[in-house]
Amino acid sequence: MIGKLNHVGVATPSIEEAVKVYRDLLGATSIGEKFSMPEQGVWVCFVNLPNSQIELIEPFGAESPIHNFLAKNPAGGQHHICFEVDDLIAARDDLRSKGATILGTGEPRIGAHGVPIIFVHPRNMGGVLVELMETPKGAH
Protein backbone atom coordinates (compact mmCIF):
# COMPACT_ATOMS: atom_id res chain seq x y z
CA MET A 1 0.00 0.00 0.00
CA ILE A 2 2.55 2.62 1.07
CA GLY A 3 4.54 4.22 -1.72
CA LYS A 4 7.46 6.59 -1.80
CA LEU A 5 8.03 9.41 0.64
CA ASN A 6 6.79 12.49 -1.21
CA HIS A 7 7.59 15.22 1.30
CA VAL A 8 8.15 16.24 4.88
CA GLY A 9 5.86 19.04 6.03
CA VAL A 10 7.53 21.71 8.15
CA ALA A 11 5.37 24.33 9.87
CA THR A 12 6.93 27.76 10.17
CA PRO A 13 5.85 31.22 11.29
CA SER A 14 7.64 32.61 8.20
CA ILE A 15 8.26 30.82 4.93
CA GLU A 16 10.71 33.54 3.93
CA GLU A 17 12.85 32.91 7.02
CA ALA A 18 12.60 29.13 6.63
CA VAL A 19 13.73 29.36 3.00
CA LYS A 20 16.92 31.06 4.21
CA VAL A 21 17.74 28.00 6.32
CA TYR A 22 17.39 25.56 3.42
CA ARG A 23 19.06 27.87 0.89
CA ASP A 24 21.80 29.58 2.92
CA LEU A 25 22.66 26.93 5.51
CA LEU A 26 21.92 23.71 3.64
CA GLY A 27 22.58 24.83 0.07
CA ALA A 28 19.19 24.06 -1.50
CA THR A 29 19.09 25.49 -5.01
CA SER A 30 15.59 24.55 -6.19
CA ILE A 31 12.95 26.37 -4.18
CA GLY A 32 9.45 27.01 -5.50
CA GLU A 33 7.38 30.14 -5.14
CA LYS A 34 5.22 30.68 -2.08
CA PHE A 35 1.53 30.20 -2.85
CA SER A 36 -1.70 30.30 -0.85
CA MET A 37 -4.13 27.50 -0.17
CA PRO A 38 -6.91 29.37 1.66
CA GLU A 39 -9.15 26.28 1.71
CA GLN A 40 -6.46 24.52 3.79
CA GLY A 41 -5.55 27.63 5.78
CA VAL A 42 -1.90 27.64 4.74
CA TRP A 43 0.73 29.29 2.61
CA VAL A 44 2.97 26.69 0.95
CA CYS A 45 6.44 26.61 -0.55
CA PHE A 46 8.31 23.52 -1.73
CA VAL A 47 12.04 23.01 -1.33
CA ASN A 48 12.97 20.48 -4.01
CA LEU A 49 15.54 17.86 -3.06
CA PRO A 50 17.10 15.12 -5.21
CA ASN A 51 14.90 12.44 -3.62
CA SER A 52 11.94 14.28 -2.07
CA GLN A 53 10.64 17.68 -1.03
CA ILE A 54 10.30 19.80 2.07
CA GLU A 55 6.86 21.41 2.21
CA LEU A 56 7.07 24.66 4.17
CA ILE A 57 3.68 25.62 5.57
CA GLU A 58 2.78 28.94 7.18
CA PRO A 59 -0.60 29.98 8.60
CA PHE A 60 -3.01 31.67 6.18
CA GLY A 61 -5.76 33.49 8.02
CA ALA A 62 -7.03 33.35 11.56
CA GLU A 63 -8.58 29.88 11.19
CA SER A 64 -5.40 28.13 10.04
CA PRO A 65 -4.86 24.70 11.63
CA ILE A 66 -1.15 25.55 11.81
CA HIS A 67 -1.78 28.15 14.54
CA ASN A 68 -2.22 25.44 17.19
CA PHE A 69 0.99 23.71 16.13
CA LEU A 70 2.95 26.98 16.23
CA ALA A 71 1.46 27.88 19.63
CA LYS A 72 3.13 24.73 20.99
CA ASN A 73 6.24 25.09 18.78
CA PRO A 74 6.80 28.84 18.25
CA ALA A 75 9.89 28.35 16.09
CA GLY A 76 8.08 25.80 13.91
CA GLY A 77 9.17 22.26 13.19
CA GLN A 78 8.34 18.97 11.54
CA HIS A 79 4.57 18.85 11.15
CA HIS A 80 3.86 15.74 9.03
CA ILE A 81 5.27 13.24 6.57
CA CYS A 82 3.58 12.42 3.30
CA PHE A 83 3.60 9.12 1.46
CA GLU A 84 2.21 8.41 -1.97
CA VAL A 85 -0.37 5.67 -2.55
CA ASP A 86 -1.73 4.41 -5.87
CA ASP A 87 -5.37 4.40 -4.75
CA LEU A 88 -6.21 6.83 -1.96
CA ILE A 89 -9.75 5.56 -1.35
CA ALA A 90 -8.55 1.96 -1.07
CA ALA A 91 -5.77 3.05 1.31
CA ARG A 92 -8.24 5.05 3.44
CA ASP A 93 -10.72 2.18 3.60
CA ASP A 94 -7.96 -0.30 4.47
CA LEU A 95 -6.68 1.93 7.27
CA ARG A 96 -10.19 2.41 8.65
CA SER A 97 -10.78 -1.36 8.60
CA LYS A 98 -7.66 -1.69 10.75
CA GLY A 99 -8.92 0.88 13.28
CA ALA A 100 -7.06 3.99 12.12
CA THR A 101 -8.67 7.40 12.41
CA ILE A 102 -8.81 9.56 9.30
CA LEU A 103 -8.85 13.24 10.27
CA GLY A 104 -11.47 15.77 9.19
CA THR A 105 -14.49 14.40 7.39
CA GLY A 106 -12.51 11.40 6.19
CA GLU A 107 -13.18 12.43 2.61
CA PRO A 108 -10.18 13.33 0.46
CA ARG A 109 -9.48 16.95 -0.35
CA ILE A 110 -7.10 18.39 -2.91
CA GLY A 111 -3.60 19.02 -1.59
CA ALA A 112 -0.75 21.28 -2.66
CA HIS A 113 0.30 18.90 -5.46
CA GLY A 114 -3.19 19.08 -6.98
CA VAL A 115 -4.11 15.50 -6.06
CA PRO A 116 -6.39 14.02 -3.38
CA ILE A 117 -5.01 13.74 0.16
CA ILE A 118 -6.04 12.52 3.61
CA PHE A 119 -4.40 12.74 7.04
CA VAL A 120 -4.14 9.85 9.49
CA HIS A 121 -4.22 10.58 13.22
CA PRO A 122 -0.80 10.48 14.92
CA ARG A 123 -2.03 8.07 17.62
CA ASN A 124 -2.34 5.42 14.90
CA MET A 125 1.00 6.24 13.28
CA GLY A 126 3.48 6.02 16.14
CA GLY A 127 3.00 9.67 17.10
CA VAL A 128 3.55 11.07 13.59
CA LEU A 129 0.90 12.93 11.60
CA VAL A 130 0.83 11.09 8.25
CA GLU A 131 -0.51 12.52 5.04
CA LEU A 132 -1.35 10.12 2.24
CA MET A 133 -1.57 11.49 -1.28
CA GLU A 134 -2.60 9.81 -4.47
CA THR A 135 0.45 9.41 -6.70
CA PRO A 136 0.35 12.19 -9.29
CA LYS A 137 -0.40 10.91 -12.79
CA GLY A 138 2.76 10.59 -14.85
CA ALA A 139 4.98 10.60 -11.74
CA HIS A 140 6.50 7.18 -12.48
Image (tube, rainbow, N blue to C red):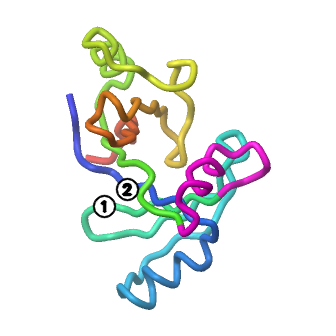
Residue 91: x, y in percent? 31, 22
Q: 60 left or right of 109?
A: right
In the rendered image, which residue does mark 1 sit on?
52
Residue drawn at the location 30% of the way across and 18% of the way down: 95
Residue drawn at the location 62% of the way across and 55% of the way down: 71
The kind of residue tagged 1 is Ser
Q: Give residue 44's quadrant in the image.
A: bottom right
Chain-order first, disc 2 or disc 1: 2
**Mark 1 and mark 2 in contact (Cβ < 8 Å)?**
yes
Q: 37 left or right of 32?
A: right
Q: Give residue 52's quadrant in the image.
A: bottom left
Q: Is residue 128 magenta?
A: no
In the rendered image, which residue does mark 2 sit on?
8
- Above or below: residue 92 compared with residue 131: above
The kind of residue tagged 2 is Val
Highlighted range, magenta = 59-75
- Above or below: residue 129 compared with residue 66: above
User: In 3D space, how far apart are the residues under numbered discs 2 and 1 (Cα atoms)?
Assistant: 8 Å
Residue drawn at the location 67% of the way across and 55% of the way down: 59
- Above or below: residue 12 compared with residue 24: above
